Image: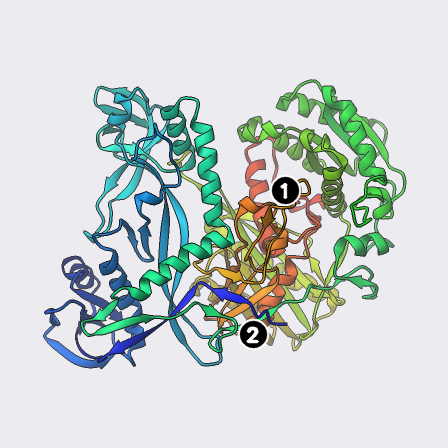
Amino acid sequence: MAPTSLLLNFLPVSLSGDTRIRVGYRPYNEDVLRELRGEFGESHVFKRDYKENTITEIPVISGAEPLADKSTEEDLAEAWWLWKPLLNAALLRLFSGSREITSDYPVSVLGSPKNNFISHADLPDWVRILPLLEFESRTLFGGKSGAQFGLVCNARTRHQILAPCDHLIERGISPIGRYVQIDQPQGDSRLAPRGFTVGKVSSIDGETLILEDHREGYERVKASDARLTGNRGDFDWCVNALLQGQGQATLSRARDAMSALNQGPGRLKMINQTAEYLRTANLEAVPGVAFEIGEWMSSTDARFPMTETIDRPTLVFHPSGRPNDTWNERGIKDNGPHDQRTFTPKQLNIAVICQGRFEGQVDRFMGKFLDGIPDFQLRNGRKPYDDGFLSRFRLERANVQTFRANSASRAAYEAACEDALKHAADNGFGWDLAIVQIEEDFKALPGPQNPYYATKAMLLRNNVAVQNVRIETMSEPDKSLVYTMNQVSLACYAKLGGRPWLLAAQQSVAHELVIGLGSHTEQKSRFDQSVRYVGITTVFSSDGGYHLSERTGVVLFEDYATELTDTLTRTIERVRREDNWKNTDRVRLVFHAFKQIKDIEAEAIKQAVEALDLENVIFAFVHIAEQHPFLIFDQNQEGLPHWEKDRSKRKGVLGPSRGVHIKLADSESLVVFAGASELKQAAHGMPRACLLKLHRNSTFRDMTYLARQAFDFTAHSWRVMTPEPFPITIKYSDLIAERLAGLKQIETWDDDAVRFRNIGKAPWFL
């Protein structure tokens, strides 16, 4: 069913006036194009014509003429490919001199200093949090009336500390320990200087700042040339230093004001005001030809792209395909896990690793975890965790033993793990699962000192599934703990190699594999050389459901293309044997990637598969992008109570619902993976869709099918009962990369533990 109350932050744009103009053209040369834009960028627009391999130049101010020796007449009404640079240039001319322009694409404009979100009588005016308006021209192809050119408008905020560091020092505020930036002019004189972070201040020598963790060539900078960065840490520190005890209250008020902008009503109000201003402004494409700004594109408009609300996917809880359910918690409580008849062992050996000072709290937690919390129910009578881990997953009474760490140190935790492993070896059995109590403060510890990674490394090396739980979580009241138990119990069963449910597959082809790529970047400091890891997750359809591949991997970014083809080849060979594929069977391969796949990468994957002697293979390469300019508003969404004690506060007001799908073009779709219901609180703003972009070399191009499939995979997580904000193909890959990057910091870690041992055949990374 298609929602009928949606607004897209897209303003249709048309032209008025005499659209016949004279333009110049010359052979394309990259250096010439750069020089022309640098010298004549305010009077002309220069655009490369890829088809003719020429530079097209359009005079955009009165009295300007084409600069090239050759010129021709163009009708702008037909030359739609020139609209984007002309609209961009018109916006720059409109705001130049009246607003601070920070970027020329997308055109980004700071709001008036009068709209500063942070204020205090003693706070100087060079401390600012301002609205930042962004304008990006786009063409939509998904409507019934054909292509529609328009302007996408968005609003966010920008933190600024404008005073140089010598001014701070004069006020008794030392920048030592903070990162600083210098201002660098941009190529276009109409643009504000760009802040360029150069390093962290280690000491001060007269009027000079001595830097550490710095860019090459920036060991020292003048205090008068440097200022603090606008990141939240430096900004908050500066406000607290300036206000001496009143900073936190001032920052809290500022966050509330910013939260109002980030929520649906505030965001819509801001861009509505911007649209009204643009409609009254003189946005000339060229002299005598104006851009006309229309009304927001609404789902009641015939030009609106094709829209639907994707149905909740079906989850299968029995090998026969019946029974099934669309709600995972209800389905597993009513039916048990998909593999309950084959899962082994039914009687688990569980080691509990905890600090001795928390043993009593951990014991209570374990009792509730194993046997449930039957006395707690919601207002509607639902009991989220009345059954417990053992009953829910059809397991027998477990052998549970506790091993104490005498402190919060890595060494103490490793000693407790060693005690557990020795006990099992001495008594002739192995641990199936370890529940490890950790602390919130462990997050701040460097990887090599962190008990979280140390215990994981030791236990995974010895083929023991590990579930870490914070003591702060264990101590929560039952009304919160029931939801935590739902997630922990699900993840534990999956880590044990269990299969809670399968996602029903639409068997439109003989075989389908979906491969996900996610990434994680490790960086010790701001300018330390970063290391990027790529995780790979493979799922395949078989017997009516999607199965997670037994092997998961992670490699350095520069090696991922080779590893991807190796993983794909290995998976296809294994599944072909298990499902008895014929070479003539139709096979569909779908790739979900955190980045746009390059042409050369897509071609390499195709060649690798073709070498497997499969005669009928089709491909889809889908980039799932979190960052993009589009916003979806639902005018009928009144919001939901954001917590039980104060039900007057509403979250997700005007936000789209989970499952909304807007097909922007044959190769682009917006899909809302997490909607208003999935927001935790109102302060988190409004739900955002993800943009799915299909690579041009894809041979399977059904964007509606691919969008629905990606949405279905958000409900196939065995990590949490609630839907994930991304398909598991991406989310699992991110987790694999993050966990292995952390484990590599433990000197005793061995990658072979998850590459070749049984523990690596289960989703140990959840």
Q: Nearer the viewer, residue 159 or 535?
A: 159
Which element is circle 1 on? helix
Give the Cα distance between marks 2 and 1.
Answer: 39 Å
Mark number displayed over residue 688: none
Q: Is residue 380 left or right of residue 694?
A: right
- In-image side of 431 versus 514 (left or right): right
Residue 696 shown left or right of residue 345 in the figure: left
Decide which of 632, 5 is in the foreground and name it.
5
Residue type at the position of mark 2? Asp
Q: Which residue does the numbered mark 1 point to in the structure image? A: 752
Name the residue carrying label 2.
702
From the viewer's perspective, is the residue at label 2 or at label 1 nearer? 2
> Looking at this view, is 716 or 382 the one in front?
382
Of the 4 image quadrants, the one containing the C terminus is top right
User: Where residue 127 appears, x then y in whole percent?
Assistant: 33, 35
Q: Residue furthest right?
A: 396
The one of 238 and 438 positioned closer to us in this rendering: 238
Q: How far across and how far down the image is residue 66, in percent?
A: 13, 72
Which image quadrant for residue 275? bottom left
Within 10 Å of the Cα at label 1, are there few (<14), some (14-19), or many (20+) other Cα atoms?
few
Residue 508 position within the rendered picture, expressed as x and y whole percent measured from the top left: 68, 75
How has the structure been colored for display?
A: rainbow
The answer to whether one can see residue 469 in this image is: yes
Q: Residue at x 21, y 45 (%)?
A: 185
